[in-house]
């Protein structure tokens, strides 16, 4: 699949040529210090200028099979321009992480790379209170991995080193769009995966493969590790410390017609909302998976999508606080 879509770097370079030629491409490679990395480096792609006072870190979806695509870049550039019109100068940086069926792309390399991305932003002086993280689909899953790692450090630190925010600090917010939180058996959370045949995503086999690698690679620790990869299966109090130690605000969105709706609702109602009063779930009437990004597959602006301005205002509000 990655071969057909093209690498994230290829997609980014093509997008820059078409939409950001006056600024050019800005690509940064993340450092390697993990036993599991095996030469696989995460990359950061900047949208617009490299701004570090207020930063949105974007973790793109793609079922862990392909990297960032042009429509995702178009969406976030649109958002950035809208914020600029409101007087908000927000740097947007995209994490291009390892994907595909190669063993080098197996779990937890994506968590390692996301950890490195956040550490890098902190190392260049970004204040956690001016950092927000957004992710869609598998990128939303990766956000849950990162949050899990911050409240429960990964049990094998040689693979994913600990990630600690400065004492007393919190990330300003996280936004999960159509997060893929139940990878291995989506039917167990309700009927929507089975009956919403017209939604764009069908990821049963891909999710099963991703989780299967955990049982193969970590036969003695899989029960400890599954909650990182499949947060809907975690203990209900898994995220109980989010508000106290990690993040100020949480937004989750889903489409009423998307196949992942049941698992998203279970995840939010059982794992997030009881422990974080400033967490919001919005279900879009008529919406499908990644609905607000899908508009940008055929256009350069939202096609009358009522959810888009709501999401952009939620993120903007966080940066105004």
Image (spheres, rainbow, N blue to C red):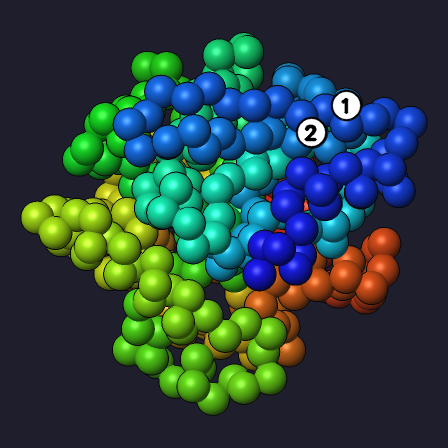
Q: Which residue is mark 2?
A: 46
Quarter placement of the N terminus: bottom right
Measure the alpha-carbon separation of dots 2 and 1: 7 Å
Residue ranking furthest to the right: 22
Q: Is residue 180 left or right of residue 60?
A: left
Query: How many numbered tags mark residues here?
Result: 2
Residue 290 is situated, as x and y percent measured from the top left of the image, at: 61, 62
Residue ranking furthest to the left: 220
Q: Quadrant of residue 148?
A: top left
- Image vertical order of residue 273 relative to residue 295, above or below: above
**Residue at coordinates 19% horizontally, 56% vertically from top-left?**
215
**Residue at coordinates 37% horizontally, 15% vertically from top-left?**
166
Q: Nearer the viewer, residue 149 or 274?
A: 149
Q: Quadrant of residue 302?
A: bottom right
Q: Secondary structure at mark 1?
A: loop
Residue 50 visible: yes
**Residue at coordinates 70% horizontally, 63% vertically from top-left?**
294
Q: Which residue is mark 1?
A: 49
Q: Secondary structure at mark 2?
A: strand
Q: Is residue 105 left or right of residue 8?
A: left
Residue 321 visible: no
Q: Is residue 195 left or right of residue 7?
A: left
- Image vertical order of residue 205 relative to residue 33, above or below: below
Q: Quadrant of residue 40?
A: top left
**Disc marking residue 188:** none
Q: Are marks 2 and 1 in contact (CB under 8 Å)?
A: yes
């Amino acid at each position: 699949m990655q071969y057909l879509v093209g690498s994230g770097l290829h997609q980014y370079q093509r997008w820059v040529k078409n939409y950001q030629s006056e600024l050019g491409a800005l690509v940064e490679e993340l450092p390697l210090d993990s036993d599991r990395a095996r030469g696989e480096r995460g990359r950061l792609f900047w949208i617009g200028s490299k701004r570090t006072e207020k930063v949105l870190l974007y973790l793109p979806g793609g079922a862990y099979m392909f990297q960032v695509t042009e429509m995702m870049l178009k969406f976030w550039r649109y958002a950035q321009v809208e914020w600029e019109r409101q007087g908000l100068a927000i740097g947007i940086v995209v994490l291009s992480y390892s994907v595909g069926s190669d063993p080098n792309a197996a779990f937890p390399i994506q968590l390692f790379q996301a950890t490195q991305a956040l550490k890098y932003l902190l190392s260049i002086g970004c204040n956690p209170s001016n950092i927000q993280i957004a992710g869609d689909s598998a990128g939303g899953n990766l956000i849950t991995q990162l949050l899990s790692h911050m409240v429960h450090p990964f049990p094998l630190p040689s693979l994913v080193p600990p990630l600690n925010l400065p004492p007393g600090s919190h990330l300003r917010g996280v936004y999960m769009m159509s997060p893929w939180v139940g990878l291995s058996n989506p039917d167990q959370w309700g009927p929507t995966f089975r009956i919403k045949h017209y939604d764009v995503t069908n990821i049963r086999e891909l999710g099963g493969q991703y989780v299967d690698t955990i049982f193969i690679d970590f036969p003695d620790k899989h029960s400890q590790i599954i909650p990182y990869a499949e947060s809907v299966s975690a203990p209900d109090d898994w995220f109980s410390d989010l508000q106290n130690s990690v993040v100020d605000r949480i937004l989750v969105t889903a489409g009423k017609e998307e196949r992942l709706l049941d698992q998203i609702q279970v995840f939010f109602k059982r794992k997030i909302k009881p422990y974080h009063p400033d967490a919001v779930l919005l279900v879009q009437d008529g919406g499908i998976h990644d609905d607000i990004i899908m508009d940008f597959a055929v256009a350069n602006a939202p096609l009358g999508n009522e959810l888009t301005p709501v999401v952009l205002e939620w993120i903007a509000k966080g940066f105004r606080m």
